[in-house]
Image: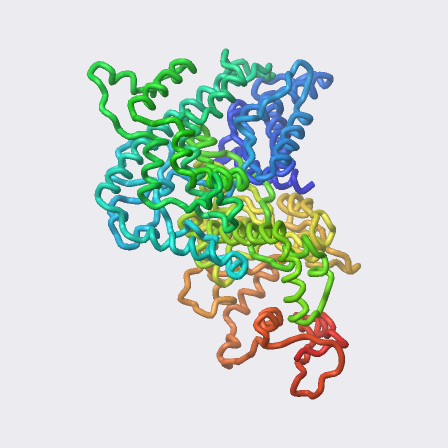
Amino acid sequence: MLTRFVVGQALEELLDQNDERTPARDILDLTVCEPALGSGAFAVEAVQQLAEQYLTRRQEELGERIDPDRYSTELQKVKAYIALHQVYGVDLNATAVEFAEISLWLATMGEGLLAPWFGLHLRRGNSLVGARRSLIPARSLKDKGWLTATPVDKPISTLGEELSGAVHHFLLPTDGWGSTVDAKEAKELAPEALTRLKKWRSSLRPKPTNPQLTALAVLARRTDRLWALALRRLQIAESEIRRQIDVWGCDDLPTGGAVTREQIEESLADPRGAYQRLRRVMDAWCALWFWPLTDETATVAGEVVSPPSLQEWIDALQKLLGVEGKVRRGHEAQLTFGQIDTWDELGAAEETDLGYSGAIDPATVVEAHPWLTVCERVAADQGFFHWELDFAPLFAQGGFDLQVGNPPWVRPRIDLDSLLAEEDPWFKLANLQSQQKVIDRTEGVLSRPTFRSFVITSLAETTAMSAFAGDERNYPCQKGLQPDLYRCFMELSWKHQSLAGVSSLIHPVSHLTDEKAELLRRFTYSRLRRLWQFINKLGLFDIKDHKTYSINIYGSEKPINFLSAASLYHPNTVTNSLIHDGSGPEPGIKDSSDKWDVKPHRDRILHVSRETLDIWRKMVDADLSNPPESTRMVFAVNKSATKILSHIANATRINYLKPQYCGGLNAKKSKQSGLIDISWGPAASWGEALLHGSHLHVGTTFFKPSRQHEEQR
């Protein structure tokens, strides 16, 4: 039900815009992506609805009707065409990707259709961690703070343009390398590894020398050339593998050629090719953020390997990517490939280019630089995904037209108790144990070498993931915020949208009420088209019944103007409210029978503009100098509630009383620091007791009862 609603709402904003009806043929060219693929449920639903839209529109355009007995067959053909050629997806779990492939096949299979191959479009990888085409300006590389320089994104369509000394971010060291050193919990578990890593990070601070800057500028030009080669390779592969499918009412669809799937897979997997050379460099750059703290992973040929110095990094890149060599007179034409149309011609051009550049066999480079072996191990485990390389043809055209899904609602935080519970469930089952007992038990499980390595690795990976997701150079809108993966997926979908593209995502709305998320809100409000906030009281979603979430439709940036409704329990309430005539009383949260109110009404739908945000700002912002575009959101159940809120916004604020409050002790931190301890039985005196008060809540004085039979000293 939710998948149908999520996709349907997106199509409302994607099709028939600006008072122009979208032609049926255009629907067959729309690209679809589910960036957190899972089982592929949203991709399957998108295929279904797009196919239905195509047939409906095409029948109207031709003035013909498909025989009812043939309709399901023709629908399957359209679905198969869209699924095979237009659908993309990424998931870190390889099994999930296989499941999604099967789901798409089962949803589109029909008579005469051979087993599909989704290998170029459905990929295993970490959607949020990868390299992209962003450049550090030449002047920034000469500054003292060059490691923290902010890159500028450049689209794939600008490949081949003059770089003017700018260098790709992933060709340069960054202060994010070695982020695993910030795993505080690992300080006592891997002290030697942490010391080595801190020393290495310090060694990267000096500015590059002039020869190094020259070498990096050359590498940047080589990178763009290899990227152009990889792009052309993928473009030809895309065109060659297209299936001939007889789509009803359409006779101008492109079909494939003679290049086989096996040839394409072999070429793209060749470590000596341009695509894999670039991918190896991108993987290494990401892996250095996740450099391991365990000697097992960092050991190559019996020795613990250190990460590279700047010069070692440059040397490895020169051998992998090549340098700009001199071309003999009369051979210049062999180095151009923009107009190459055949697989074999491209192969010859690629071989010539790599030969003239002096690029050598990657196996030889890895042998000379063993730290690359460690990077390979890390990359294989983490599954870094480089969208603009792996889906280069798509981004050369401008991005995705439709993105849908339910990205993970996860904050990459260290939960040591959960890690320890993997070995000993006591850490999750035991409650209110003394700190000394916890320490003793922890030392016991960590004395087991294999499990100790597992804990160190988990701590390092979580810390590095948090650093990458929270770095404003990777996700600018996350500046000043604790990393939350759903927020990164929001920003990722905005980056990957085509100019007229739409994204429809299910995620929480904590960023709309988080006081520190001002920057993210500014970008959110200007992209929102529709926001439907749900409370899970009817159990439509596999989360707790009191949890809230929203279905959010995003487009390109424009003046703030979006539809919104809050305190919803069922998607049909939205669908029917959008066509309601406005008669009858406005529904609220519960109806007269004390049941959750799902009745539709026109006045449930609010039209949010900058003026609306200004009213909210007066209500919730202590600092009225902040612009309305960054204000926190107020969720009103109907228009009557909105009118009341506008009056409240102009009332005297309680802050004129200058109230004071105390947040009390943080129980977890106080126990860890030794300020308080827990034991059973009566306290010797009131001076040793710390009382739990009732947990107060809005409208419910005793929201949670006090804990009984415990004293904290």
Nearest the viewer among 501 and 267 is: 267
Q: Give above or below for 513 relative to 525.
A: below
User: Residue at the left extreme?
Assistant: 329
Q: Is residue 497 visible?
A: no
Q: In this figure, what is the number of numbered marks?
A: 0
Q: Say whether residue 332 is left or right of residue 525.
A: left
Residue depicted at x 51% and y 54%? 463
Q: Position of residue 615 (x, y in %)?
A: 49, 63
Q: Where is residue 496 in the image (x, y as percent from the top left)?
A: 46, 38
User: Residue at the top extreme?
Assistant: 258
Give the colour scheme shown.
rainbow
Nearest the viewer among 123 and 195 is: 195
User: Residue at the right extreme?
Assistant: 593
Q: Say whether residue 334 is left or right of residue 10.
A: left
Residue depicted at x 65% and y 52%? 534
Q: Where is residue 174 in the image (x, y as percent from the top left)?
A: 37, 49
Q: Say whether residue 168 is left or right of residue 570.
A: left
Q: Give above or below for 386 relative to 344.
A: below
> From the image, which quarter does the N terminus lie in?
top right
Q: Can residue 211 be seen in this view?
A: yes
Q: Say whether residue 682 is left or right of residue 87.
A: right
